[in-house]
Image (tube, grey):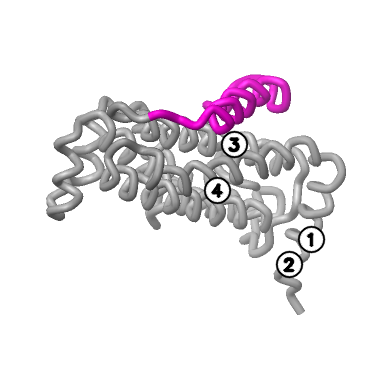
Amino acid sequence: MMDLWAERSRALEALKGELAVENALIERAFQLLEDIAQALPVQATNNVFGSIAALVTAKGLALGRGTWSLMLDSLGQEAGAISRPWVEAVELLMYLRKDPAHLKQVVEGTLPSAGERAKAIGGFAKPLRDHWNLSASHIGTEAETWAHMFNLKTATVKTRFRYSEAVLRGNMKILFGMLAWNITEASLCLRAPHGRMPQPLARQVDSLISEDLQVFDHPSTELPDGGTG
């Protein structure tokens, strides 16, 4: 009988051992994103803006947790299907804070499409969205969608994906990059248009981003490698 949680169990053991430092940074990032989401409704100058930004941040937090959960199951490729709307959530935060008039669109239900919003903010995440569109979010005939499900050595379809420390660490780097981006944009929403960020939160954000250089060697801006293989 298939043990659905076998690879997750191996991953969780690694998070206590060889990947403990990386895991601690990931956990701090999730906690900080939650703290910012809770602070937004009361700290932002505009209460409506703060409440909406808090909701979008909370959605990003939930999508991030879903992404992390699939990575722990050695389903990194499939995690991209959840990360794809996560990108939209972070870009929506950018869209809201860059022009106060955009808040009215949310209230009136007239927001333009995600693609149009990305163009309006000069979004830099199009390559990332395109990658996940091609490899994870949609079912197509492209090799990127299916390559991780076929074993070239044995010419067989793969139905189970084995835990790999190297792959999980690489996926953790991608996850942290997304978390750092979400945290940065949510933090800026605390200051927009004339708000303030509580100093304890500000110090935590600065500390977390700088620690990425030590834990993951360099900032997490790479595209996913196509899955867990």
Q: Position of residue 69 (x, y in %)?
A: 62, 56
Crowd band around label 3 with a 10 angstrom C-alpha radius: few (<14), some (14–19), many (20+): many
Crowd band around label 1 with a 10 angstrom C-alpha radius: few (<14), some (14–19), many (20+): some
Task: Report the mark closest to the observer, 1 or 3.
Answer: 3
Residue 36 lies left or right of residue 119; in this view the side is right
For the residues bearing labels 2 and 3, Cβ distance under 8 angstroms: no
Looking at the rendering, the stretch of residues picked out in magenta corresponds to 196-221
The quadrant in which the N terminus is found is bottom right
Task: Report the mark closest to the observer, 4 or 2.
Answer: 2
- Pointer 1 residue: 9
Quarter assignment of residue 192 = top left
Instruction: Determine the CA span between mark 2 and mark 3.
Output: 23 Å
Q: Amino acid at mark 1?
A: Ser
* Helix, strand or loop under label 2: loop
For the residues bearing labels 2 and 1, Cβ distance under 8 angstroms: yes
Q: Mainly helix, strand or loop, the magenta region?
A: helix
Q: Position of residue 71 (x, y in %)?
A: 63, 51
